[in-house]
Image: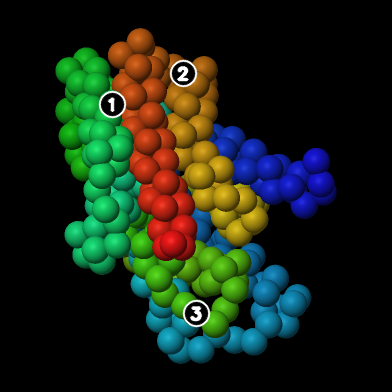
Amino acid sequence: MKSGMAKSYGALFLTCTIWGTTWVVSKIGIGEMPALQMSAIRQFLAGFIFLIYFLGIRKEKFPSINDLIWSVGMGMLLFVFANGLSTWSLNFIPSGFSALIGALYPLCVVIIERIFFKVRMINFLTLFGLLLGLLGIVIVFYENAFHSINPHFYWGVGLSLIAMLSWSVGTVFVTRQKVEIGPYHATGWQMFFSGILLYIFSLSAHQHIPISEITLTSWKAIGYLVIFGSIITFIAFIYTIQTLPAAIASLYAYINPLVAMLLAALFLNEKLTTHILWGSVVTLIGVYLVNLSIKRAKAVASVPEQ
């Protein structure tokens, strides 16, 4: 294997595995501090490190006002709502279930692009994949909802769904909006602004404790999430989507929930029943079929007329 491809697949491996671990680490961290505050500190520190590198070390030029405004908007979608609310949802639902809901975002991207931009045809394979993805979620939801003693379970599901929808909308806009700064530099600004906004959100929602009261366990979780979950994995993720075919780069969406479920069962004693496993498999097959239908549609569109 050539060195370039080895790096690409190495980055894909990091994306598939590390992002799966962040759900479990996040749940450990919020066990001793508010979820929104932890997400705010995580994003702010990661964004600050990115900006120190690009502005201080690489001496890149300061972004334009338009690029900064765009970064605030993307930060709201991708980190304030997507990451902040999904982290908050972990107070109420199993981490593996939240990760599985997050894996539905490719299905939502297809629906959003079809309804608002008229660029996706919903063929039989796409529709079948959408139905399978939803069926799998229903199976897992049934298993959790009717065997859960947590009275706020439905609130957690709602937060996770809003987070997934926000990530889907952000994904659509990111692919359509052209900015002058590079994707890594842009990610730094998005995280930086989202950290500030999340902290304001945490204060208004009373999801806040004094910094001095944050425990060592939570600081360790934050450190892991900043270094591995926000910096290393986002660099790896952007690298994979730039160097690998979309069908391969999207494999992380299928593997992350499984990693999260297995680790949660091992370290958090979250139940892993046959219903949950089968529901997860059905959902991920649905996501795969939707991605496959998109790939085939693009291949047909790229064939020149005779």
Q: Nearer the viewer, residue 273 or 267?
A: 273
User: Residue under circle 2?
Assistant: 265
* Cα separation between marks 2 and 1: 19 Å
The residue type indicated by label 3 comes to Val
Query: Residue 299: where, in percent of width, then height?
Result: 46, 52
The residue type indicated by label 2 comes to Ala
Q: Nearer the viewer, residue 217 or 211?
A: 217
Quadrant of the frame with the C terminus: bottom left
Q: Nearer the viewer, residue 141 or 193?
A: 141
Vertical relation: 77 (above or below) 176: above
The residue shown at (39%, 23%) is 281
The residue shown at (38%, 17%) is 277
Q: Name the mark on residue 179.
A: 3
* Cα separation between marks 1 and 3: 37 Å
Tag 3 and tag 2, C-beta contact below 8 Å: no
Query: Tag 3, which secondary structure?
Result: loop
User: Residue under circle 1?
Assistant: 136
* Cα separation between marks 3 and 2: 42 Å
